[in-house]
Amino acid sequence: MNLILLPERVDQIEWGRSDSRFRHITKVLRVGQGSVIDFAVENGPRGKGTIEYLNSEKINISFQWNPQHAPDFLPIRLLIGMSRPQTCRKVLEQATAMGVEEFHFFGAEKGEQSYALSTLWTSDEWREKIRNGVEQAFASHLPRCIIHENLASAIHELNNQSDMRVALDNYESTTKLNSSFSNHNERVCLAVGSERGWSAGERNQLRANQYIICDLGTRVLRVETAVVAAIGILGSGPGS
């Protein structure tokens, strides 16, 4: 992690040796008393933490916070079919680090219903994956994450929130995805199917709701790879 994210703004804090942040500071960062490290508040400012006291049992840190800053998300909402938990973990961390504004996972017709019962979703693990992505990106704002029963309900919620709608599909693509599909003044909804791809019914739903069916080339990519590649293209803006 490139900074440590705190749930709320404080002037001073103390952690014991059982706290994972204590272990990270002492075992990974390997800093000592008087050292200054980077922190941020969830959906709040970044700042510096000075280690005021440190021994083998506890650490005490004081903070100086920068002014509040606006969210720095890319104008991209990710609409994605529920996939294997290990795939979703990668998507959550990597797409968060790249700056997506929202995640909308849906129960895909070709997916497995059991995926939604994973501990990733039934515990707070998904929140931790998002936090990890924010910390990696040296950011502070957390994207929203919503789970929908199916594609239709997800599309219904997103229809009035996006200026451009694109869906990745190697098999029935009509054009190649490129940066001309977005500019920095528009919100884009990027739709990616589950690991087994779109069903015929889902493709019809996408077309009926003005999604442009695109591809990233002739190679078939893993879901997490396709997500990262597409966000990189859309996030670069026109003319790239």
Image (cartoon, grey):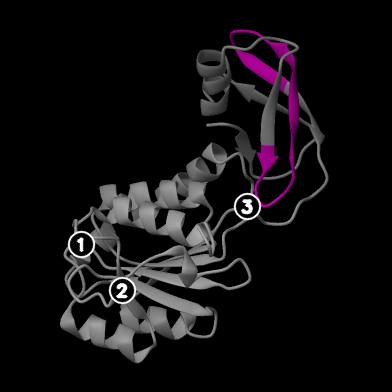
Secondary structure of residue under mark 2:
strand
Amino acid type assigned to the residue bearing label 3 in the image: His
Q: Residue at x 19, y 57 (%)?
A: 220
Secondary structure of residue under mark 3:
loop
On residue 175, which mark appears?
A: 2
Q: Are marks 2 and 3 in contact (CB under 8 Å)?
A: no
Secondary structure of residue under mark 1:
helix
Could you classify mark 1 by the number of other residues whose Cα lies within 10 Å: few (under 14), some (14-19), or many (20 or more)?
few
Q: Which residue is mark 3?
A: 141
Determine the image quadrant of residue 185: bottom right
How much space separates mark 1 and mark 2, taking CA atoms? 34 Å
Instruction: Inspect the magenta stretch and tell me whether residue 48 lies in it.
Output: yes
Q: Percent position (x, y) of residue 134?
A: 55, 45
Amino acid type assigned to the residue bearing label 1 in the image: Ser
Q: Nearer the viewer, mark 3 or mark 1?
A: 3
Image: magenta residue range: 40-60
Could you classify mark 3 by the number of other residues whose Cα lies within 10 Å: few (under 14), some (14-19), or many (20 or more)?
many
Q: Percent position (x, y) of residue 128?
A: 47, 45
Q: Earlier in the sequence, mark 2 or mark 3?
A: 3
Q: Percent position (x, y) of residue 155?
A: 40, 82
How much space separates mark 2 and mark 3, taking CA atoms? 33 Å
How much space separates mark 3 and mark 1, taking CA atoms? 30 Å
Q: Nearer the viewer, residue 190 or 85?
A: 190
Whether residue 62 is situated above or below residue 41 in the rendered picture: above
